[in-house]
Image (cartoon, rainbow, N blue to C red):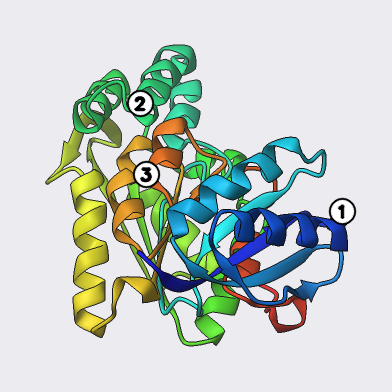
Amino acid sequence: MEISFTTTLIASGKLTAKHLRDATGLLRDAGVAVDDAHWLDVGEAAILPCVGDKMVARGALSALATDMPTNMDIIVGHSRPARLIIADMDSTMIEVECIDELADFAGLKPQISAITQSAMRGEIDFAGALQRRVALLSGLDATVIDQCLAERVTIMPGAKCLIATMRARGARAVLVSGGFMPFAGPVAAEIGFEQAIANQLEMADGRLTGRVLGDIVDSDTKLAVLQAEMAKARLSSNEVLAVGDGANDAPMLRAAGLGIAYHAHAVAEAAADAAIRHHDLSAILWAQGHPRAQWVAG
């Protein structure tokens, strides 16, 4: 289907005019109409306005990303900035998987991390995997949560800048995590999200019981939140951006006008419109047409 869209080339510090010419040639050879490329930031990111089939464009440019030694990210997507971002937390907005770090305090990190990775690859059901992992933490002192938050949880590079800039330009930001509210709440506040949705751990007598309270926040929840936020603000899908890394993010990545798999598992990349494999989260601002001069420090 022929539509207007933008192709963003990102190779921070290594992008050249030749790369832009090569990309333009590949797109035109594939039947995609391309206007003159323009720099967002010279040597770092550039935009090619396009008309044609987005899937054809992605296929045509795949060779460019593979062949270049420049660690290039190519994003075929929005023609305008998003007004809503729905984001995953673990390994997306923060650098760790919180449940794996909690497990380390219990001496169970290898066992629990193996389940986490299997769930993120889509090999096992997320809800069942979460219940299994939380059950293994039964009896863990609840004070470990605060210690884990302080010592292990680090914000992903570019996260604060991404959210601060999008919010400054009128976008709403919602963090939806299959992790836990004792982490998601503080993380959302530090980064600048307006709302955080995550699972609640049951505790009794100052210890984890090994159970999750209420319904589990899974892939269906993430999709439902995206759809509800869209409906509330009367947005089209082309005004919505989603970012995540695992199988439980796949439905929301497919539903967003621009779904971005961030340093992600293959199942998330397959569901997304584009993948960021080399740069930090601030690259998503280039994908929306924002040069560095418009970025807001978080």
Q: Which mark is residue 140?
A: 2
* Secondary-structure class at tag 3: helix
Residue marked by disc 3: 271
Describe the element under mark 1 as helix, strand or loop: loop
Amino acid type, label 1: Lys
Image coordinates for residue 262, horizontal then vertical, percent: 54, 47
Give coordinates of residue 164: x percent, y percent: 58, 76
User: Mark 2 or mark 1, which has the lower sequence index?
Assistant: 1
SS label for mark 2: loop
Which residue type does callout 3 highlight? Ala
Mark 3 / mark 1, whichever is N-terminal: 1
Q: Nearer the viewer, residue 102 or 80?
A: 80
Residue 161 visible? The answer is no
Within 10 Å of the Cα at label 1, are there few (<14), some (14-19), or many (20+) other Cα atoms? some
Residue at point 68% right, 43% down?
Answer: 65
Task: Give whichever of discs 3 and 2 has the lower sequence position.
Answer: 2
Residue located 44% across and 52% down the image: 55
| Residue 14 numbered mark, or none | 1
- 280 sits to left or right of 54: right
User: Looking at the rendered structure, which numbered label has been put on residue 222?
Assistant: none
Spatial CA distance of label 3 from label 1 is 28 Å
What's the CA distance linking mark 3 and mark 2? 36 Å
Answer whether labels 3 and 2 touch (C-beta < 8 Å): no
* Callout 2 amino acid: Leu
- On screen, 297 above or below 276? below
Q: Residue furthest left?
A: 214
Residues 57 and 210: in front is: 57
